[in-house]
Structures are given as C-alpha cells and as structure tokens.
Image (spheres, rainbow, N blue to C red):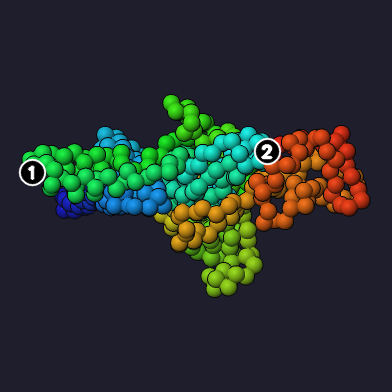
C-alpha cells in the first residue's frame, strides 16, 4: 500500500506542476499579447504624429515658396495664384498643428471605428446677386473679383481653381473641380469656405520689396538697411503682402446632405467691415456631395465557411455575404450559390450550442430566415462574428449612403487653376414659364425666348431691351404667343427636394 500511495502522491504532484506550468505559460502569453497590442498602439500613434509633422514640414516649404513667388510676381495672375497658395498652406499648417496638439493632450483618444468612405464634392456652383441694370444692361457696378473655395474634412483641406475675373456679366460662379476626401468617418462634417479678393487696377505692390531692396544700397546706411530688410522679410512671411483674400461665406455639410444628384444648400455670409469688398452672394450654393463606402467596393473579409451544411468559399462585401462552391467561381464572377443580406435589421449571434457556429437571422416578407454558418475553429468564428457585426453597425451608422453605391467622380491629375473664361449661367438654363400649352414637350428657356444661341449670354443683350419681362408677350415659335398672365416667377434653386 505504501508504494501505491507514494506513486499516487507523485502523480498528483506531477499533475499540479503541469497545471501550474500551463497556467504560467498562459499568463505569460497573455502578458506578451498585451505588450504587443500596447506597442502597436503606440507605434500607430507615433506614426500618425510623424506623418503630421512631415505634412507640417511640407506646408512650411510650400508657404516659403509661395511667399517668395508673391514677392517676385509682376503680373496679376501670378500674384493671385501665389496669394491663394499661401492662404491654403497657412490653413493646412494650422489644422495639422492643432491636430498634433490635440493628439498629444488626448493620449487615450480612440481611433476611427467602423468602415470609412471616400467623399467627393463636385458640381459646385455659387449664384451671384447683381442688380438688373448691372447684369442685363452692363452698367453700374464695376467691381471685379477673384474667387476660390476651400473645403475641409478634419485635417484634410482642398482648394478649388481660382476663378478670375468675376464681374457683373456673370450670374453664377462654376467651379470645375472634384474635391476628394479619403478615409472619412460617418460622423464627418465638411466645411466649405468661399474666399474672394476685389481686383484693383494696380497690383504692383507685390513687387514693392524688390524695389525697396534696390534703393537700400544707395539711400541709407547698412545698419538701417539690415533692419528694414528684416522687417520686410517678417512682413513677407506673415502673408500680408500682395492680394488679400477675405472669407465671404461658409457652409457645413454632413452625411445627411450626401446624394446622387445636385442639391442647393444655404450659405452663412460673413459680414465685412468694408461692404464694397463683399462679393454679391445670393445666400445659396449648389453642389453634389457623394459618399462611397470602402466596404461597398472592397472585400471586408473572405474565407472558407460551412453555410447551411455546405462547404463554400465566402466573401463579405457591400453588406452582403455571398458564397460560391469554390474561390475560382467567385473570381470568375459566377452566380453565388448562397446570398445573405447583412443590414441594420440583421441579427448576428454566436450559437449557444457551439463556439464554432454563427446564426444570422433576417426578416424576409414577414418571415424569419435563419442562416447557420460553421467555421473550422473558434478563432475563425470570432473573426467572422466581428466582421459581420461591424457590417450591421456600419449599415446603421451610414444611413442612406449604405443602401446604394453613390458614384464618386474621377479626379483629374492636372487642372487649369486660373480660369478667366465666361462661365455658363443658371439664368440661361432656368425655365421662366410655369404653365404652357400641352403641345409643348418642354418649357421654353431664356435662350429660346430671346432667340439666343448657347454661346450667347444674357449680358450680350442690348441696353435697349425692355426692362421688364412681364410687360411683353413672349414667343417660343413664330406663330404661338403666350400672354403675361401665363408667366410665373420661377425659383431656379431647390432645397434638396428638387434637382438643379
């Protein structure tokens, strides 16, 4: 009995030692994973800060180059372009530095969760409000402006082309740019700012530092010359030389404003001390704001699964789980054998009977449809569960943008940043007659009423034209006339309900 008890004691001790070793191993493994996770978090944080510092250095160089170009510019176009680039660099640098300070203060700031999107701003058009005599008769208001816009989402800032000159002959400003923002979260806020500069006949102030520098040698001493040169350098670096662009108006757009079509939005007009320098804005602008989710065009997760007791290769994309008999059939774009929608109404749960099973429940025509997904391991089941749950949350977070893919326009690599040609007018395209006879397929536009060609603008009408459209009968053809009682004022811009 004694040897047997001794052997049992040794066996129990061996089992306990093995359990202690296994527990120690698991504890050390958990600590290792925690250290790796913490290190990756810090590495990501430091990488993000390093990227910001790199961007700040780039903008500092851009700012210095723009300031030098502004000092050396002799032509109006060069001065305006340099001033626009200088203002854009200053805004970007301020945004980067503010974000860098915010990240250093908030160490525990959580990163973006869920799917991000590409957001594009295009078809940007800003109507102007001139007096009738100024636009139609080409007299009165002689002001001319140079105009561009800044659009920002977080620290990402883009500028449009510079439209110059903008005068009383134009009823609206059209920007040909497509501004694209990447990795945008669902809670984004896009800020649009309109800047303008009233053009003066004499813009030679940009070359003032060069002229003063040439006279320093002959007129004053070296000591005074050095101080004057230093003051000019400080003034140049502060961006106060040359054309000064002022903020005219701003607007904020969110996910609710995204749509496939063009819509009209309100502007918050900035009050200037000098009203003469204010751009005659109408208080609204038109644009197309589109958001295309990354998870709708890229695979969220792929792998081999067993769906409804059938082994398949599955792909999760565009809020849909599709399964094929093999990966080659999926790559050949063949019809899937199984399609399961994953949206805000979907219930994704881990099976209570097995850690390797996932239950996906959808409501189809009032009936509950349950899809069972089996995985080869518990770890793989956890990954699929995480991605499926994330898709459900993204579909709820992105609202209507998750229901249909909104097309993002192609961004051209090059653009003409200084545009001075006559833009088209919303007035030219706006129907004036609300009620017409049934034999007209479409309502006549201003061009048809006045017999203008598409290349002819309203500003080309002679000053002898009647001042009121209501005092004359309008003819759309040689025989049919419409009286003034049929003419009804028509608002050319719609607030989200109608398209432009």
Q: Quadrant of the C terminus?
A: top right
Residue 274 percent coordinates (x, y) = 44, 28
Measure how far apart labels 1 and 2 are at the Cα level.
Answer: 65 Å
Residue 400 percent coordinates (x, y) = 61, 43
Q: Secondary structure at mark 1?
A: helix
Indicate which disc residue 222 carries. Answer: 1
Nearer to me, 392 or 337: 392
| Mark 1 surroundings: few (<14), some (14-19) or many (≥20) residues within 10 A | few
Nearer to me, 448 or 248: 448
Rendering quarter of residue 102: top left
- Give the labeled residue for mark 2: 494
Residue 127 visible in the displayed image = no
Residue drawn at point x = 88 percent, y = 38 percent: 483
422 relative to 479 in the view: left or right: left
Rendering quarter of residue 494: top right
| Mark 2 surroundings: few (<14), some (14-19) or many (≥20) residues within 10 A | some
Nearer to me, 306 or 454: 454
Q: Secondary structure at mark 2?
A: loop
Q: Is residue 254 above or below residue 443?
A: above
- Counting residues from the N terminus, which is met first, the one under dot 1 or under dot 2? 1
Residue 76 visible in the displayed image = yes
Tags 1 and 2 touching, CB below 8 Å: no
Residue drawn at point x = 27 percent, y = 39 percent: 238
Nearer to me, 381 or 326: 326
């Amino acid at each position: 009995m004694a040897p047997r008890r001794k052997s049992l004691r040794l066996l129990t001790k061996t089992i306990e030692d093995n359990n202690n070793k296994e527990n120690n191993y698991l504890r050390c493994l958990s600590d290792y994973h925690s250290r790796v996770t913490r290190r990756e978090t810090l590495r990501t944080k430091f990488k993000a800060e390093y990227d910001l510092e790199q961007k700040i250095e780039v903008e500092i160089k851009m700012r210095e180059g723009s300031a030098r170009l502004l000092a050396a510019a002799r032509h109006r176009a060069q001065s305006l372009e340099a001033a626009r680039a200088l203002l854009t660099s200053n805004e970007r640098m301020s945004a980067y530095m503010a974000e860098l300070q915010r990240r250093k203060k908030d160490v525990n700031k959580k990163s973006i969760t869920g799917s991000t999107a590409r957001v594009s701003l295009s078809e940007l058009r800003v109507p102007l409000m001139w007096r009738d005599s100024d636009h139609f008769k080409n007299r009165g208001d002689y002001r001319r402006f140079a105009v561009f816009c800044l659009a920002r989402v977080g620290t990402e800032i883009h500028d449009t082309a510079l439209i110059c000159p903008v005068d009383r002959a134009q009823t609206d400003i059209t920007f040909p740019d497509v501004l694209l923002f990447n990795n945008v979260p669902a809670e984004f806020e896009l800020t649009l700012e309109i800047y303008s500069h009233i053009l003066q006949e004499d813009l030679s102030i940009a070359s003032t530092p060069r002229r003063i520098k040439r006279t320093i040698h002959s007129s004053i001493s070296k000591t005074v010359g050095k101080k004057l040169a230093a003051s000019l350098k400080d003034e140049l670096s502060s961006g106060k030389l040359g054309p000064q662009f002022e903020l005219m108006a701003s607007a904020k757009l969110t996910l609710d404003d995204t749509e496939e079509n063009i819509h009209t939005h309100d502007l918050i007009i900035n009050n200037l001390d000098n009203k003469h320098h204010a751009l005659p804005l109408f208080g609204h602008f038109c644009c197309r704001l589109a958001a295309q989710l990354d998870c709708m065009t890229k695979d969220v997760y792929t792998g081999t699964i067993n769906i409804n007791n059938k082994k398949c290769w599955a792909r999760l994309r565009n809020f849909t789980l599709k399964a094929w008999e093999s990966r080659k059939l999926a790559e050949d774009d063949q019809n899937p054998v199984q399609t399961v929608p994953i949206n805000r109404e979907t219930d994704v749960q881990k099976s209570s009977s097995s850690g390797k099973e996932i239950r996906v429940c959808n409501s189809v025509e009032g009936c509950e449809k349950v899809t069972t997904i089996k995985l080869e391991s518990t770890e793989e089941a956890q990954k699929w569960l995480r991605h499926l749950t994330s898709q459900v949350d993204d579909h709820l977070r992105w609202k209507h943008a998750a229901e249909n893919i909104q097309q993002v326009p192609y961004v051209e690599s090059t653009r003409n940043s200084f545009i001075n040609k006559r833009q088209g007018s919303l007035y030219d395209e706006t129907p004036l007659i609300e009620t017409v006879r049934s034999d007209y397929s479409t309502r006549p536009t201003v061009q048809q009423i006045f017999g203008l060609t598409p290349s002819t603008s309203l500003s080309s009408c002679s000053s002898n034209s009647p001042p009121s459209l209501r005092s004359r009968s309008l003819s759309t053809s040689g025989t049919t006339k419409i009286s003034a009682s049929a003419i009804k004022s028509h608002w050319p811009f719609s607030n989200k309900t109608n398209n432009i």
